[in-house]
Image (tube, rainbow, N blue to C red):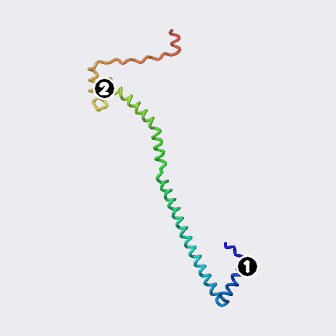
Amino acid sequence: MFDIGWTEIMVIAVVAIIVVGPKDLPRMLRSLGRYAGQLRRTAGEFRSQFDDAIRESELDELRSTLQDASDMNPLNEIKDSVSESLAPLQETADDIKSSIEKPESSGADAPAAEETDGAKPEASVAKDAKRPAKAKPKPKPKAKAGAAESGG
């Protein structure tokens, strides 16, 4: 880390023996070791607090991601998309249903509407007996291909 070789360490040791003296050198090295230990502990505490802060920020991100995932309900999205795609079919079905119901509610089939309203069937039969019967037009039969050739 500091790129100090053996020659530099020897120079520092010789200078320390000359400056401090051989008697006080062990005490100085002990106090230097204590300071180095305190520095390491402080650095370790700082690092652990920093790591805790990073973990909390990651947990906050994870919580927000989890909340977003729980808010997103795929069943509701599928249901909405299916209902949107079936909307034209529902409109067509409603149109067909309304076109079928319109002729029934017209004047020709009025007794049938009365029966569905809860009127007694005998009363509707009696009313039908008083009215003259309307002739309904018969549908034209479809001509077969073979019949058209033989008849003509």
Residue at (39, 28) in percent of width and height:
99
- Circle 2 residues within 10 Å: few <14, some 14–19, many ≥20: few
Res 97 → quadrant: top left
In the image, taking residue 28 as reference, residue 79 lies left or right, namely left
> Above or below — where is 120 with respect to 82?
above
The kind of residue tagged 2 is Ala
Disc 1: which residue: 7
Between residue 42 and residue 68, name the one nearer to us: 42
The kind of residue tagged 1 is Thr
Between residue 117 and residue 97, name the one nearer to us: 97
Label 2: element kind: helix
Disc 2: which residue: 110
- First-in-chain label (2 vs 1): 1
> Above or below — where is 88 with respect to 126?
below
Alpha carbon separation for disc pair 2 and 1: 120 Å
Residue furthest toward the right?
A: 7
x and y percentages locating residue 135 in the rendered image? 34, 17
Between residue 121 and residue 57, name the one nearer to us: 57
